[in-house]
Image (spheres, rainbow, N blue to C red):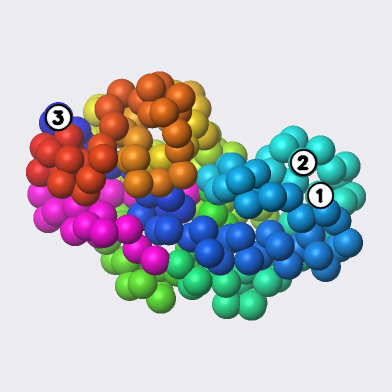
Amino acid sequence: MNYTTVLWDLDGTILDSAPGVFASFVHTFETLGLPVPPAEQMRTFLGPPLEVTFGETLGYDAEVAAKCLATYREIYLNGGQAVNANIFDGVLDVIAASKAAGLPNSLATSKGISGVNIVGEHFDFLDLFDVLGAADLEKGRSTKSAVVEYALAELAAQGADLSRTVLIGDRIHDIEGAREHGIEVILVKWGYGDESEWAQADAVAETADELRELLGL
């Protein structure tokens, strides 16, 4: 496809984080005395920023949403749930091939930078990326669009060719964030998306080998 730069979502694209995420959500709701949503609903929480899940999706007011966020992060980061995950088959090999081909690669994830560092060090993949594009609430970076903007700015500062950038993700939020910056999107079917989301991508990959081919590697 002759792409010049690749942005990578993390949860649902590289990392199957569902076990740790589900456990953290259940802990959060039980700790705060809130109803625990059914598993089918919690599956939709995989991908969007936590602020969206606790606020817009669940409809909690700002005070309750803030308590949810703090409780979730405590168990997810400090309780070890961040590494209660698995790497999807073959995807790190594709990223390594992209790097070997000379393409700049950056994460573009709504996961907070602390969580990125924890799982990245645990699974030893941080050195595959030129930029760690992640959410950082202290710097006002929480939406996918803001993360993409940050990643692009950091890559540009390194001299990356951004003339044809693609974002690899799995959910509609990846598409929406990328489109705000005029970026193409490839969604992977092994993540947490569905057919309605895949239909809005520029391309869809069912396997890591298909993704490799789409990237021209």
Q: Amino acid at mark 3?
A: Met
Q: Which mark, by number, is residue 58? A: 2
Q: Is residue 81 visible?
A: yes
Mark 1 touching mark 3, by CB under 8 A? Answer: no
Element at badge 2? loop
Q: Which residue is mark 1?
A: 65
The numbered mark, 1 or 3, whose residue comes first in the sequence reads: 3
User: Distance from label 3 to label 2 (Cα)?
Assistant: 39 Å
Q: Earlier in the sequence, mark 1 or mark 2?
A: 2
Identify the residue shown where x is 40% and y is 22%.
Answer: 200
**Which mark is first along the chain, 2 or 3?**
3
Q: Would residue 119 be counted in the magenta stretch?
A: no
Q: Quadrant of the N terminus?
A: top left
Marks 1 and 3, Cα distance to the nearest angstrom? 42 Å
**Dot 3: within a 10 Å radius of its alpha carbon, few (fewer than 14), some, or many (20 or more) residues?**
few
Q: Position of residue 91 (x, y in %)?
A: 26, 55
SS state under label 3: loop
Which residue carries the number 3 mark?
A: 1
Q: Position of residue 189 (x, y in %)?
A: 34, 40
10 Å neighbourhood of mark 2: few (<14), some, or many (≥20)? Answer: few
- Marks 1 and 2, Cα distance to the nearest angstrom? 9 Å
Magenta residues? 86-109
Q: Is residue 90 magenta?
A: yes
